[in-house]
Image: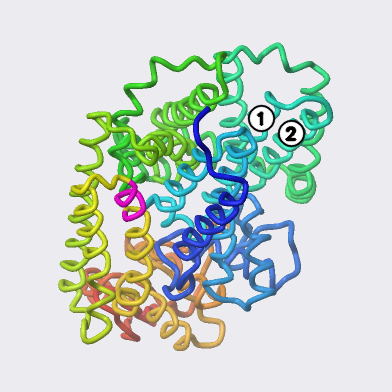
Amino acid sequence: MEPQPSAKQWPFAFIAVLAASASAFFFGLGRLGFLGPDEPRYAEVAREMFASGDYISTRLCGCLWFEKPVLLYWMSAAGFRLFGVNEFAARLPSALAALTTVALLCAALRRLALPRLALAASVVLGTSGIFIAFARVATPDMLLTATITAALVSALLFTRAIGRNRSIYWGLSWLFMGLGMLAKGLVGVVLVVAIVAVYFAVSGQVRSVRWRDLLIGIVIFLSVAGSWYVPIIMRHGWAFIEEFFIRHHFERYTTNEFGHPQPVYFFLLVALAGTAPWMFFLIPALSRLRSLKPRDNIRDSIMTLAWVWVAVPLLFFSVSESKLPGYILPIFPALAIIIGSEVERVWMGDRNRALRVVLWVTALALVGMGAGFLVYLHRESVSLNGWRAAVAGMPLGLALVSAVALAAHKQRALIAGAAGMVVVIVLASVILLFPTLRDEVSLKALSLEAAAALRPGEKIGFYLKKDFAAVFYAEGRVLCEPRRGTTFYALHQDMVADALASESSLVLITDSRWLEGLENDPRFTTEFIAAHDDALAVRVSPKR
């Protein structure tokens, strides 16, 4: 019997893992303005839902917007009610979902009598770069990841339970599939069903599911998902079905209409980079794949599920025409299990040659990350006087101490150092970098200036710049196109002219590169409002 953490030790270790993860997910959560094209739009839909009290129809700047389902909007609206309308409240659902995923993974593995693997996997997940990044943005990807993780671990526990518990886990799996449908649509069901079907086939569990179980599960799923899909379809009918299911599900998957093409190997690179700094542990894990016997013991059964959990979404999305990193976020709990198994071996003193090489490569990578962090701070001209210099040097110092400890054959120190360094980099970034990057990575300041300059009835539009921060910071006073179901985004000056046929003026958010073209167009008069770096706000009116 392998030595495991004692019943008294485990709760303290579990709390420590959650505390470290929470600090990486929550610290400074609202200190940056909304980023990119999507985050401000999701936050604005939630704001309009909160302001109107209509929790069925999803609207963006007053126009119906059926791109994503409702779970994120409901949770963000609840955050607005509790904490006010701000970035922290909008991002809170993602951070909570991330912490819940870490806790669920840890609790489920412990339930299966593998408490050491539970702690290792949760440490890896809570300190993986991509997982922290998505925990800190207001998008539905982390909610989907949490629901898929909950559905899959419930299905796994179903195969090991007896009596009433078996029915409970089966019902929970379908309940979480319903929540996944509310989080991001059909993908929350398709992925879970496909993963469970393959896993059950490989592990010989197919016959354990009766037709009665399936019917009960479907009823639970429909009851949960139907809480929103039934009223929204009853209210908007074919318009919703066409936009939500046909355009944003099937056309997004089969065409490049939304402009996210990537090579077929794109998600393999995302999977590797996203597990930083733990990615090198996948090398020995791959070598153990062929020896798995899922029908013989619980550990091999779990590892088989983890590999299926990784493979199915990777294959599914790799053939999609549209590819974004968040699409495969749900595989990272599975990768954490796989990597966690190798981390567990290291923790227990395994001196396998391959693992020793991985440890040294990881140590060098940590030193590189710490040095790179200092270089980046210097490049951004961050002031490092006094205590700030100590904070800036902590990641590199921790990496060097971990490497020295490894040289002294203290393998556990490197594992603890890697996890600690990731958390320290996040905390140091919030303290040192966020004040400097605030106006570089977000158009919050420019958007607020543009909103303050708006005349009565005037609206904001976007010209060749897909940073839609003004959608939220102007409180929806943005021109929308009901026919396209989105905010006004002009690709050329003729589109601006067409919009001005029905508007007396527009405040355009654009790039400084395009200002000359607007100024020289004989159809417009322009008025400079504000600029931040290369982005600017300019009022455009038709010449009379």
**Residue interval drawn in magenta:** 412-417
Kindly report the distance in space between the C-alpha atoms of the residues bearing marks 1 and 2.
7 Å
Above or below, 258 against 306 in this view is below
Residue 247 seen: no
Above or below, 330 against 530 in this view is above
Label 1 element class:
helix
The quadrant in which the C terminus is found is bottom left
Report the residue marked by disc 2.
169
Report the residue marked by disc 1.
155
In the image, taking residue 73 as reference, residue 133 lies left or right, namely: left
Q: How is the image coloured?
A: rainbow
* 257, 279: nearer the viewer: 279
* 534, 323: nearer the viewer: 323
Q: Residue at x 47, y 65 (%)?
A: 23
> What main secondary structure does the magenta stretch of the protein show?
helix
User: Residue 393: where, in percent of width, then height?
Assistant: 22, 71
Q: Residue at x 48, y 26 (%)?
A: 303
Label 2 element class:
helix
- State which quadrant residue 46 falls in: bottom right
Question: Disc 1 or 2, which lies upstream in sequence?
Answer: 1
Residue 190, labelled with which disc? none
User: Residue 446: where, in percent of width, then height?
Assistant: 38, 80
Magenta segment: does it hold 413?
A: yes
* 240, 42: nearer the viewer: 42
Mark 1 residue crowding within 10 angstroms, few (<14) / some (14–19) / many (20+): many
Kindly identify the amino acid type of the residue bearing the numbered disc 1.
Answer: Ala
